[in-house]
Amino acid sequence: AVGQLKNMFAMMKLFANIYLVDHVLATPKRGEEPDKWLVVNQHWSLVFYIMLGVIPLVFAHLADFAKFSWKVGGTARMGLSKGLVNAFLHLDDSSRAEVDEGLLNEAMTHDAETLIKMGYANFLAVFALIGQIVLFVLFQVAAPLAAGSSRAGSMILQMALFPLMMGGALVLRLGRTRTVLQERRDADRILSRHVHDIVNNLALLKDYNLRYSAMDRHEDLLRDVNAKDRAVGEVLENNKYLMKWLTFLTVAAYVLNGGISVINGDMRLGLYLTMSKVFVGLGAKWTALYQKVLQTFNSAPALERLVHFINLPSESRRCMQLSRDTRRLTLDFVNQPGDHEPGHDSRFNTIPIKVVNVGVTLRALTRQGVSKAETRLFFDDIIIQQGTLVSLVGQRGHGKSTLLKMLGGAHLPDCPDSEDTGNCMFFLPSHLRFLHVATESMFLRGSLYQNLTYGTFPGHPDGRVHRVKEVCRRLSLSDKLIAAIDPDSKDELSWSSALSSSEKHLLCMARALIANPDVLCIHKPTLHVNAATAELIVDILREFVDHRGIEQKGQIQHRRPRTCILTSTRALSMDAADAVFKVDGVDKQKITKVVDKHVSLEELC
């Protein structure tokens, strides 16, 4: 609306210019009557002409200033970015395995803004430019007729041919332009993917001494990008000068034709000058329109990536359904008839964790190297009481880690379709906070304190500096590392490369304990440490369950029970556990509770 209003003002200004030259500034000959279009006289007509310029300028200024408060671009950008991040956070395993991380990063950081600035905003600009071109053409048709020029027919014909030539030239050049732009985008994408691979595989490049090969490959890709960029520059430059040549030839023809008309007295000078200016302006508008259309085409890859990533299969519906079922089952359990236990240990604290006839969909490679989905089923029931330390054991590849990931929320459960499996139930009490700790140590790029308090809420007592340091001391972390725990620290190190394997493992353990979840699901907590440290870790996990948290204030009975579920690699984990479950089988997982904990780990695994 604002653009079209400006177009109307521009057309009004063109008529005002004709009025200025042909009526206000034209000196009447002796004996002629004053021009009937004058406002009182020539002096007041000049004031009237100035006012015709001031009023549109005021409206344009107010409209352009007000557009910053409309928040159209910011709202659209926020919606796209939030939708993309939300889609990524809820991708299912199959989608996540197929995602190109380089393209995803580009989509998250650049594509939303590119689509708004080069797509949506340019669409509005194209609409405004088309409106200007239409109004200029209408002016070119109306002005000679209104002025009563005897050469109006030939002028209108010339004016009609001009937009046809400009539009035809753009259409003819569009195919070649789109080709070179697509080739450059492809080259940029390949280069971006190569840089991403270098950054993520630096250790592998060092191990196999392939750093120079990676550099040679990078140089080759840069040469290709430069060549494609040069081709794009040449095509765009030729397109720009094509518009200029067509404009020049059209204006030259009009100068000759219109000049003869002015000399012969068939056209007034004001109309001639204004029409010449309109031709030059039309050439500029067509050139701008062409550039806006190209920019809009350049936003097409961003739109394709955003649409692709946002519409990948996600877990959102399954998460929503699982959440609803869990809340319903929790309320059903709490509302069962019977007396509630006195004190803080109410019915909520006695709700068990149940897994009955539940499977999980994973990705597996076929002999042809193609990723496909397979479902591993857990047929036997597993019931875990709150406030217990549970150990999962079993042979490698038989599903104990998969079951732990499912309990920790890293994998969503599936109910099998077969009729002989009975009722399916995956019940994690909805009021409990679960935390999953993977085998691999993971860190954010930030300060050590930020990494250790990642699982705590801002301002929560669990994130107190004293408590954080004390938990680290309990895990026998070095004084040097503990001294580096500073909330005001601005260090942003790559902790994964700055620490040893055991330090990274212990820090991840500390982060989990500092987060203080209701249920802690942890993979192989004693894997990367020696025997003495392993015993220390098991003792701390035992204390986490018995004392309902580590380094907590207040009386124990006033806290919610703490549960720890872990996979065992040492016998001492079984000895400290309240319950041991053996996950057995390959095609159909069976979960058996181990009654005799004196059985050796080797016999169970």
Image: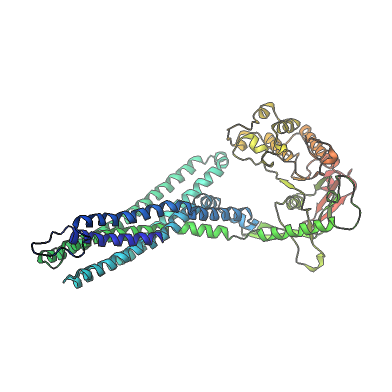
Q: Is residue 465 above or below residue 52?
A: above
Count of numbered labels shown in the rendering: 0
Instruction: Give 260 or 433, whichever is nearer the viewer.
Output: 260
Q: Residue at x 22, y 57 (%)?
A: 45
Quarter of image, res 490: top right
Q: How is the image coloured?
A: rainbow
Give the x, y percent position of residue 58. Answer: 36, 53
Left of 252 or right of it: where is 103? right
Give the x, y percent position of residue 320. Answer: 70, 59
Instruction: Give 540 or 130, whichever is nearer the viewer.
Output: 130
Quarter of image, res 509: top right
Specify whether residue 274 is in view: yes
Left of 280 or right of it: where is 90? right
Left of 80 or right of it: where is 354? right
- The single residue placed furthest to the left in the displayed view is 30
Q: Is residue 504 above or below residue 76?
A: above
Give the x, y percent position of residue 213. Answer: 48, 43
Q: Residue at x 25, y 54 (%)?
A: 47
Q: Residue at x 25, y 59 (%)?
A: 280
- The single residue placed furthest to the bottom in the displayed view is 153
Specify whether residue 377 is in view: no
Q: Quadrant of the N terminus?
A: bottom left
Give the x, y percent position of residue 588. Answer: 78, 59
